[in-house]
Image: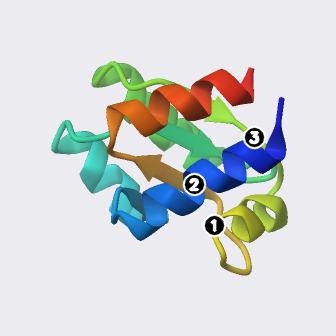
Amino acid sequence: MNIEKVKSLLGMAQKGRMLEVGKMAVSVLIKRKRAALVILAMDASEKLKKEIEFDCRRNSVPVYIFSDKDGLGKLCGREVVSVVGISDKNLAAGIKKWLL
C-alpha cells in the first residue's frame, strides 16, 4: 500500500470533480450508477458502513475500508471524512492498485 500514490490520485480526482465526499453525495453517486469505487473510513459508524456497503453490493460497486476519518480527511484535503466515492474508472483502478 502506497499512501502517497493514493493521496495523489485522490487529489487528481478532486481537482477533476470526480470525487464525492460524504454520505449523501456518495449515495447519490452510487444510485445513479456513476460510482467506480467507494472508500470508507475504518472508524465510520456501523450504520453508515452498512448502508453504503448495501448500496454498493446492490449496484456492483467495489468498496474498500481504508485509514481512519482523520487520515481519509487529510488525503482529501478536509478535516474529517467518513466516506468518499470516485466516479472515474481509470482513477478508481489506479487507487485500487495502490490500496491492495
Q: Which residue is drawn at 33% across and 45% down?
A: 87
Mark 2: few/some/many CA within 10 Å (<14, 14-19, 20+): many
CA separation in Å, label 3 and label 2: 13 Å
Q: Mark 2 points at which residue?
A: 10
Q: Which amino acid does label 1 sit on?
A: Cys
| Res 100 visible | yes
Precedes in sequence: disc 1 or disc 2: 2
- x, y percentage for residue 84? 52, 54
Q: Which mark is residue 76?
A: 1
Q: Give the image quarter of residue 97.
A: top right
Q: Which amino acid does label 3 sit on?
A: Phe
Q: Residue at x 82, y 36 (%)?
A: 2
Q: In this image, 12 relative to 69: left or right?
A: left
Precedes in sequence: disc 3 or disc 1: 3
Q: Give the image quarter of residue 99.
A: top right
Q: Name the residue under label 3.
A: 66
Asked which secondary structure carries label 2, the reply is helix
Q: Which residue is drawn at 22% across and 41% down?
A: 34
Mark 3: few/some/many CA within 10 Å (<14, 14-19, 20+): some
- Whether pointer 1 and pointer 2 mark residues with C-beta atoms closer than 8 Å, the reply is yes
